[in-house]
Amino acid sequence: MIHRILIVFSLLGTAWAADGDLTLVGGSDADSGMVYIEFGGQQGAVCNDGFDVYAADVVCKQTLGSTSKATARFPPTSGSGLQVFLDQVECRGDESALMGCVHGKLGDSGKCTVENSAGVICWNPDDFPSYAKNHGIFRLSGGPVSTAGRVEVFFNGSWGSICDEQWDVEDADVLCKQLGCDAAVKASSGSRYGPGVLDIKLSEVQCDGTEDDMIKCRYVVLERGMNTTCTHEREAGTNCDCGVIVTIGDGQAGRGLLKVRLIGSQESEGTLCFDSFDLRVADVACREAGFPGALSFSEAEASTGPMLATSYSCTGSEISLKACVATAFNTSQCPEGKEVELVCQSKEGVKPTGATVTTGAPEQGGLSTGAIVGIVIGCLLAVVLIVLILFCWLRNKGDASGGSAPI
């Protein structure tokens, strides 16, 4: 009877301890997918409201031991009955698990629906270490569109910003070209795109303009505790010229017909064909237009104008359609009324990177309630086992002593 009770306690402890565990589902490979979170023995979605690249960093770290390339949209399976189990996620990016970020109550969806579920594209954990060793990994964060923002670099195992000491347009040019664009419009200083919260990794970046990777430029590595004038009020930023202007609908609501204008020697403008379009291209287009990402795309109800003789293939992590693979497209192959309409994720709920952390947020790497309960049950189970072993040992010792006593 006692051993059955112990088994039940053990199973309960295991179930509770799984709360907060993450799985990636429905991606194009094992390194991407919709974020599923465990709660009470079931899996549910994580809401994309406020879910940004820093939250994606944490998810990729927790699930694969790598880091993120981008947030992404992966629609849930129709009729799956999936529910949202976590909302209002705000991460710094250096937490070890998603439950260590600021978040709503686990198991409570708030007002979020499964149509607004979060997804990620992660670096492959096997390829990433060697790639990071030989290449610079950079991104732009905190800007109004994906082609502008604070410069961040993955360096010595984690993400961080760059000090604006000696930062100029020549340095920014190298970065923008590395990210797939034509040039830099401007190199900004003084944390133009808001102060970050991660470590400042590099300072005094100096490029001569011939480099194909900014990590090949000269720079000074900033270590924690170094005496430096670099602060979060002195972070470098840039605005890249990618030669593309993306407009969705009226340009404000984030829904409607997708129009792409190509600027350059052969300027052209038009819609894109639905048949050669997917969600990864949609994500890039929405972010370039100033929205967090895509929710869905569909066919336009009627033809509205010229179609661009180009189709795009994107991984989903590009800062611009210019950085995607562009292929010449015969517009006559696209039937009338097959232009793309987009629905982008709302800007509402997106918070600045340097926002003050909500009072009462779990500390970095904090355990979920379920994990704590699981640990407590495990400890109680250990105590019960010790007591039982001690009881049996004393009883056996007593029996042995009684058997050897003289008659």
Image (cartoon, rainbow, N blue to C red):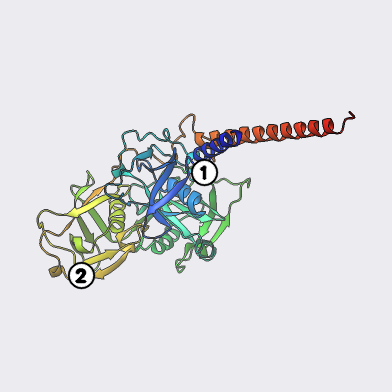
Q: Secondary structure at mark 1?
A: loop
Q: Residue furthest front?
A: 407
Locate residue 244 relative to residue 209 in the image: left or right: left
Position of residue 158 in the picture relative to residue 238 (left or right) = right
Q: Nearer the viewer, residue 398 or 154?
A: 398
Local packing at callout 1 (Cα closer than 10 Å; few below 14, some 14-19, many 20+) is: many
Find the distance from the CA under tag 1 to the CA under tag 2.
Answer: 44 Å
The kind of residue on which mark 1 rests is Glu
Residue 152: which numbered mark, if any? none
Numbered disc total: 2
Q: Give the amino acid at mark 2.
A: Phe
Residue at position x 79%, y 32% in the image? 399
Front in this rendered view, residue 177 or 377: 377
Q: 10 Å neighbourhood of mark 2: few (<14), some, or many (≥20)?
A: some
Q: Measured along the vertical axis of the image, is residue 96 above or below residue 369?
A: below
State the image coordinates of residue 165 (x, y, percent, origin top left): 51, 52
Task: Say which element carries label 2.
Answer: loop
Marks 1 and 2, the one that precedes in the sequence? 1
Residue that carries the numbered disc 2 in the rendered image: 329
